[in-house]
Image (cartoon, coloured by chain):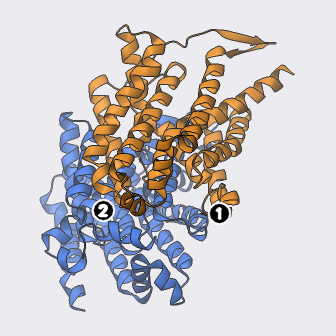
Chain colours: A blue, B orange
Amino acid sequence: MKRKVKHAFFPVALVLLAVLGPFILEPFDLVNLSAFSAMAIAALGLAFVWGTLGILNLGHSVFFGLGAYAYAIAVFNLGDSTLAALIGIALPVAFSLVLGYFLFFSRLGDVYLGVITLCVTLIFYSFMTSTADPSFHIGPVPLGGFNGITAVPSLNMPGDPQAFLSTEATFSICLLALAGAYILLSFLRSSDAGRIMTAIRESELRSELLGYDIRFYKLVGFAVSAAIGGLGGALYTAVMGYVSPNVFDLPQASQFVLWVIAGGLGAFVGPVVASFGFQLLSSQLGANQVFNTELIFGATIILFVMLAPQGLQPMLLGLSSLKFPNRFGILRRKEESA
Amino acid sequence: MDSFVMLCFAVVNSIALLALISLGLAVIFGMMRVINFAHGEFIMLGGYATVIANHAGVNLWLSMLVVAPMVVALIGAVAERLIVRRLYGHLVTTMLATWGLSLFLIGAVTAIFGNTTMGVSAPLGNIPIGAYSIGAYQLLLIGITALLVVGSLLALHWTKYGLIARAAMQNSEMSATLGINCDRVYAVTFIVGAAISGLAGALLAPISGVLPHMGAAYVARAFVTVISGGGALIAGLLSAATILGPVEAMLSYFATPVVGQASLLLLAVIILRLFPTGVSSLWTGGR
């Protein structure tokens, strides 16, 4: 219980920012921060499935991208953004259940999971870039190939498609959604099911011998992360007003993984903070065109993996010696059971 | 009739292509159980080495068959020394680190050469078959791939180094006890794998051109082939390529290349559902 209270400051801070932000920040910053939070929500999905359940999903951007595309297509077809956002959650979940069935019921190891999920992203990328032909359309919406779908309507009042929400309201919704995702995943992690998931991360064999169906728990955890990832994608499209195949490309996939490694595997606050930090950094670098983002991402991933594999949150809080008995933390422990 | 011959050619070509782009990865993964996510970028670097050497006046064959493998072997050696060597035994960590390397290399090449396609023209001419024609270079590519695969098989099973390498791969502690320098065996294996990837990239440069992001197009197919092949290094690779290649060729022929690639992944996922340790587990008993 003590642990929960200690970490309650984070959602409270997010809610405070959601309420006060519109009064103190410029509209430009509000839009930026809304987009950052949408990405951070998706990162939480990965932090959960990887940090709690030990599933290495290098293609988490599939769920983000599917949510983004599903929202864009649904909002054009339906007009109402609330239902579209729900579809943006439902489609990635459906996809995760199908993919997860094959992955987890084949009992594939970590490395295979990582490789296959990354391949799925790359295939989606090449598929979406090849849809430039007008014959690729869903309802009135052409998929648009490399250019993607543009001028996507932003969020509106539920049930009233004409009443678009202001920048300020969208900002508050994004931050509240982030706080909500954080609270939901924290509760899930400390629930009975979450404890079983943690046990599976620690030792699949032991959990199985205790009578738990690890395949089922993995599938459920995968679907939860897909739902959170899809929500992030849907919000991102709503904020930015466009979606392109780039949501499926390598830099996008690497961002989520980088934030989770950098923030701390097994942590939630760290990945969110890391996602805001790195997005701020890369938007600065990108605006100045100083460095190539892939170069930076790549170098940072290498540095974190080699030098600070536990990530920032456990390192800064001095928990590393308590929670991770060896230098490689979860990264290492998984292999011993594999 | 002519179109049937063309389809057969496309099938064989597709099998050879899969084997060619996967061989370097299979050597590293099969021998060392190290997932090299920078594989696609090693291919890309091989392509760049060829094009740049050729533009600098080096004979095309020389730059393809000698310069490119050597350049990529050198880069592989540096990567092995700086990154991979420190992480042996940490499968996931190695995978993440090589993924970082992959992005780093893409970024570095983009920064140096720009995000444009460079190329060399395909040598040799065309061989007419009825109303169609086949590039003679593509036939040569199939031949070279066959040579490479057979060569690797012979090197693994008939040479002393192959024996040592297989021993180090099966039980590194035991081999170390017997006086084998496993670190060196691993280093050499990684460098050989990198060189083969570089050669693959060099051979592909005339047909596909080179650009910084080209690795992504190959890496998914290479991984899918190696993973669905399973434990037996060359046999697994060949059997997986033989199953996946025709499917990809057919669907690319009758639909689009993207559908072909997607079907490749779908098929691999189904194969892994049926044989979680790859098709080669059929005759190795699931090892």
User: As drawn, which residue projects farthest toward the right?
Assistant: B1
Amino acid at dot 2 = Val
Subunit ID for the residue under disc 1: B
Question: In the visual, does B94 lie left or right of A102?
Answer: left
Subunit ID for the residue under disc 2: A
Q: Quadrant of the N terminus of chain A?
A: bottom left
Image coords of residue A177 (percent x, y) = 34, 69
Question: Which residue shows up at 66% across the image and 55% down it?
Answer: B279
Image coords of residue A54 (percent x, y) = 41, 71
Question: Which residue shows up at 13% across the image and 74% down it?
Answer: A318
Image coords of residue A265 (percent x, y) = 30, 68
Q: Secondary structure at mark 1?
A: helix
Q: Which mark, residue B273? A: 1
Q: Are marks 1 and 2 in contact (CB under 8 Å)?
A: no
Question: Which residue shows up at 67% across the image and 39% down it?
Answer: B245
Image coords of residue A84 (percent x, y) = 50, 60
Q: Which mark, residue A260? A: 2
User: Badge 2 local density, few (<14 within 10 Å), some, or many (20+)?
Assistant: many
Q: Is residue B251 visible?
A: yes
User: Badge 1 local density, few (<14 within 10 Å), some, or many (20+)?
Assistant: many
Question: In the visual, does A9 lie left or right of B154?
Answer: left
Amino acid at dot 1 = Arg
Q: Is residue B55 above or below residue B179?
A: above
Q: Is residue B59 above or below residue B106?
A: above
* Between marks 1 and 2 in the image, the one whose residue lies nearer the viewer: 1
Question: Which residue shows up at 73% across the image and 36% down it?
Answer: B250
